[in-house]
Image (cartoon, rainbow, N blue to C red):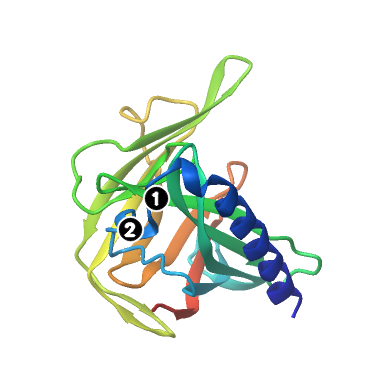
Amino acid sequence: MKVINLLMVAIVLLASCEKEDDASSTNTPENQLKITHMPLSVGNYWVYQYYKIDTNGTETELTKQDSVYVIGDTIINNNTYIALGSVIISQPNSIVNYSFYRDSIGYLVNNRGVILFSETNFTDTLQVDVSLYEGDTTYMVSWMMENYNNTISLPIGVFDNILNYKGTLCLGINPNNVENPRFQNNYYSDNIGIIQENYYYLNGSDSFEKRLINYHVN
């Protein structure tokens, strides 16, 4: 009930913002959403369970679940974005975190202009994240698309037609000249959305995954 109340507040706030900005833009959600691997119709939702995986491959289910909902659309800098609300439903007093996406000539981008996905470009580096501390590089992640030619089996089902937004994580060094890089995978299944992601903490050797356990797509 707490999650529903939070999301209802979010919908009201976004609707108010949209009314204020409607006159300044002719963009509509329908002409922004051409990427079938990330269906962003209002009412769609995804629920994920988190896991920790140690260097021996032993998995531990964490007491953390994330629920992501498509709330509606809003105008930012004269562009129409689809708004998503994310709530850690397994933690008390969780708040709604917002993200905003649109289709920019076949690229899924957020409101900061960061490219998060492409269904057609498998040759270019789409994004490079660099972290600096006192002038030194602490890590770099370069992101490219990968056509994942396997299926992914989860308790909720078997998924195919998967594209991977893949990050190569390197610590304090040029990512083109590194031994044993870490890879961050974001697997998108066609007409479903993100089904699985993995990530790391810089000061640890364990990896973490979030896996789809429930969803609804219109």
Where in the figure is residue 108, as x and y percent of width and height? 35, 49
**Does 110 sit above or below residue 37?**
above
Q: Amino acid at mark 1?
A: Arg
**Does 25 sit above or below residue 210?**
above
Where in the figure is residue 23, as x and y percent of width and height? 48, 45
**Does 36 sit above or below residue 107?**
below
Label at residue 33: 2
Q: Circle 1 sits on which residue?
A: 102
Circle 2 SS class: loop
Front-lying residue, 47 or 50: 47
| Left or right side of 2 for 83 | left
> Residue at horizontal 35%, vertical 72%?
192
Which is more N-terminal, label 2 or label 1?
2
Label at residue 187: none
Front-lying residue, 190 or 51: 190
**Residue that protrudes farthest toward the front in the picture:** 23
Where in the figure is residue 106, as x and y percent of width and height? 25, 48
Which of the image's four quarters has the N terminus? bottom right
| Left or right side of 78 for 87 | right
